[in-house]
Amino acid sequence: MKEIQKNTHWIFELEDDGTVLHSSPHHRQAEESSTTEVGYNFFDGLSGLDNVSDFERHFKSFVRSRKAAETFTVKCSSGSDAVDAKVIMTRAYQTGYCLPTGVVMLEIKGN
C-alpha cells in the first residue's frame, strides 16, 4: 500500500485475518498505482502509520464484534506532516446474510 497522505482514499476488502482480497485506490491515485497487490497481510503493508498495533487492535475487535460498521481515526506521518486518516469498516454482505468467511470492507481517507 502507498503511504497514507492528505487526500488519499483507499478501499480494501479484507479477510478476518487481515489478508487483502482486493484493494482499489481512489481514481486520483489510480494513475500512481501500478498493479493492485493482493494476498498479503494488510497490517504488514502499512507505511507511515504511527501505531499499526492500535489499528490492528481496532480491526480485530471489530471482527469479533457483531457491529455492522465502525469508524475511527488514526494518526499517520507523512514526512514532517501528521495526517489524520478516517477509517470506516463495514461487513461485506451477500443476499442478506454475512459471508461465512468474514469479509470486511475497509475505507481509508487521509484528511
Image (spheres, grey):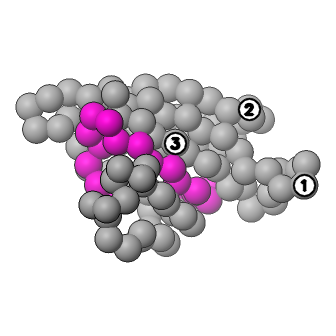
Give the x, y percent position of residue 55: 43, 38
Q: Quadrant of the C terminus?
A: top left
Q: CA distance from mark 3 to mark 2?
A: 16 Å
Which residues are drawn in magenta? 1-18
Which residue does the numbered mark 3 point to in the structure image?
107
Comes first in the chain, label 1 or label 3: 1
Q: Is residue 40 left or right of residue 65?
A: left
Q: Residue shown at 42%/53% (left/top)?
A: 27
Callout 1 amino acid: Thr
Magenta span main SS: loop
Q: Is residue 24 left or right of residue 110?
A: right
Comes first in the chain, label 2 or label 1: 2
Element under label 1?
A: loop
Q: Nearer the viewer, mark 3 or mark 2?
A: 3
Q: Residue shown at 27%/61% (left/top)?
A: 32
Which residue does the numbered mark 1 point to in the structure image?
95
Give the x, y percent position of residue 93: 79, 51
Q: Quadrant of the N terminus?
A: bottom left
